[in-house]
Image: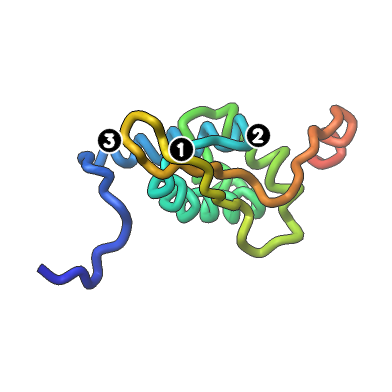
Amino acid sequence: MHRHGYKGRKFGRETDQRRALIKGLATSLVMEERIETTLPKAKELVRYIEKLITKAKKADLANRRAVIAGLSTQVAATKLVDQIAPQLVGRTSGHVRVERTRLRVGDGAQMAVIEFVDELKDMPKEAKKEAKK
């Protein structure tokens, strides 16, 4: 069978399970700002989160709703749009990095850390109010 035109990884899961997995990983990355997972999952997450960050940087109503739909929780979506995206305005792409770390003991799977490239700072409450204006 040819491999042409088949995009994305399947992870041995059904479509809805795969979508939930990526959504959960993206939510964890936004909340924790750094997560460890297997290398294929991290590489697939890069494709997903880059598009969400681009939408979050525009921050109009339609894009805000798209970010909410793309993440598991409203808290994570709010954090991405209001706190993380304004700090990533200087970049057009390449917002996250994937670094290989270790082989998992149980099955020998290649693990990787995925994190934001720029150092994210906690915004003080006064700066948050000014950013919303």
Q: CA distance from mark 1 to mark 3?
A: 17 Å
In the picture, residue 21 is in which quadrant? top left
Is residue 24 or residue 62 the one in the foreground? 24
Q: Which circle, 1 or 2, is nearer the viewer?
A: 1
Label at residue 74: none
Q: Considering only order in the chain, which callout, 2 or 3, is on the residue closer to the N terminus?
A: 3
The spot of residue 107 in percent (x, y) is 31, 34
Q: Residue furthest left?
A: 1
> Which is nearer the N-term, disc 1 or disc 3?
3
Q: Amino acid at mark 3?
A: Gln
Give the residue type that dot 2 points to. Lys
Please tell me how crowded label 3 is: few (under 14), some (14-19), or many (20+) other residues with Cα within 10 Å. few
Under circle 2, the secondary element is helix
Name the residue: 53% across, 32% down.
Answer: 28
Circle 1: element type:
strand
Q: Which residue is mark 1?
A: 37
Q: Residue at x 41, y 51 (%)?
A: 44
| Residue positioned 59% across, 46% down in the render | 61
> Marks 3 and 2, how far apart in space?
25 Å
Q: Secondary structure at mark 3?
A: helix
Tag 2: Cα neighbours inside 10 Å, few (<14), some, or many (≥20)? some
Percent across and percent down for residue 2 are 14, 71
Question: Which of these two is toward me, 71 or 98?
Answer: 98
Name the kind of residue labelled 1 in the image.
Thr
* Residue 18 in the image, given as x and y percentages of width and height: 30, 40
Check if mark 1's residue and mark 3's residue have beta carbons within 8 Å: no
Give me the disc on residue 17.
Answer: 3
Marks 1/2: CA–CA distance: 22 Å
Residue identifier under label 2? 79
Which image quarter holds the N terminus? bottom left
Whether residue 3 sits left or right of residue 132 in the image: it is left
Apparent side of residue 20 relative to residue 33 in the rendered image (left or right): left
